[in-house]
Image: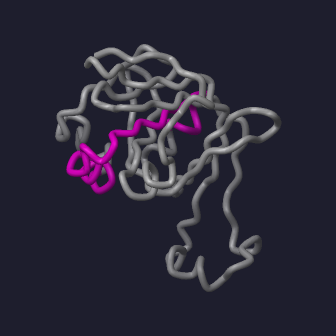
C-alpha cells in the first residue's frame, strides 16, 4: 500500500460519478473503535476559503456516533471496484456485526481518521459545521418527500479537506 499526498486542486476525477455512482465510505473513529458506512450523497466545494466536503448521515446510522465524537472523518473512494463490499457497508450495521471483517477491507490508521488500504482516493476532513436537516427548511417538498417519509432526517457535516491521499499507480 502506498499513497501520496496531492493538492485538492490537482485531482483529476469526476466526483459526481465517484460519489453518486461508484459510492464512497465515510469513516470515523480510532484503531480501538471505528465505523464506516457507504454513502452516495455528498459533495465537495469551497466554504470560508477552505476546500470542503459535505456529507449527509441519518440519525439512525451507527457511524453518526463516531462523527459526533471525533474531530476528523475520511471519505474513501474505490473507483467502482468494490461495489459488493460497499454494499455490505451500506446494509450491515456495525452495531450488530463486524462489517469491516465481512468485507475483507483493510483499515489504515495513519491519518487523523481511519481509511482503507484498498481505496484509490482518500479525503481526510476536519469537521467545521454541522446542522440537522429540517422539513421547515426544505424548499422542494416534493423532491424531499420520498426520502423522509419516516422522518429520519440527515445530519449535514461540512469538513475542511486537510489532506488528499491518492493511491500510487505502481501499487
Whole-percent x, y for residue 51 in the image: 69, 34
Q: Residue at x 42, y 32 (%)?
A: 121
Q: How many marks overall?
A: 0
Residue at far right of view:
48
Residue placed most toward the observer, 135 or 84: 84
Residue at position x 50%, y 54% from top? 16
For the residue pair 98 and 22, the one nearer the viewer reads as 22
Q: How is the image coloured?
A: one colour
The percent position of residue 7, horizontal first and vertical second, equals 59, 23
Q: Foreground residue, 168 or 26?
A: 168
59 relative to 37, above or below: below
Measured along the vertical axis of the image, is residue 128 above or below residue 83? above
Could you say where residue 87 lies in the image, as x and y percent from the top left? 27, 53
The quarter of the rendered structure image containing the N terminus is top left
Residue 108: which quarter of the image? top left
**In the displayed structure, does residue 49 sit left or right of residue 169?**
right
- Residues 163 and 132: in front is 163
Q: Which residues are magenta?
A: 66-92
- The question of residue 44 being in magenta is answered with no
Question: Quick check: is 91 in the magenta stretch?
Answer: yes
Q: Residue 143 falls in which quadrant of the image?
A: bottom right
Report whether 54 appears left or right of 91. Answer: right
Amino acid at each position: 500500500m502506498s499513497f501520496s499526498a496531492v493538492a485538492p486542486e490537482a485531482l483529476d476525477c469526476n466526483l459526481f460519478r465517484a460519489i453518486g455512482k461508484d459510492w464512497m465510505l465515510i469513516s470515523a473513529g480510532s484503531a480501538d473503535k471505528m465505523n464506516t458506512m457507504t454513502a452516495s450523497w455528498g459533495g465537495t466545494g469551497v466554504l470560508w476559503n477552505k476546500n470542503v466536503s459535505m456529507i449527509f448521515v441519518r440519525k439512525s446510522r451507527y457511524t453518526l456516533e463516531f462523527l459526533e465524537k471525533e474531530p476528523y472523518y475520511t471519505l474513501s473512494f474505490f473507483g467502482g471496484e468494490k461495489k459488493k463490499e460497499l454494499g455490505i457497508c451500506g446494509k450491515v450495521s456495525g452495531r450488530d456485526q463486524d462489517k469491516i471483517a465481512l468485507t475483507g477491507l483493510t483499515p489504515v490508521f495513519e491519518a487523523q481518521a481511519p481509511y482503507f488500504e484498498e481505496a484509490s482516493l482518500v479525503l481526510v476532513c476536519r469537521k467545521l459545521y454541522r446542522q440537522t436537516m429540517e422539513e421547515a427548511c426544505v424548499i422542494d417538498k416534493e423532491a424531499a418527500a420520498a426520502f423522509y417519509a419516516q422522518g429520519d432526517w440527515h445530519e449535514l457535516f461540512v469538513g475542511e479537506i486537510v489532506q488528499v491521499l491518492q493511491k500510487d499507480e505502481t501499487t
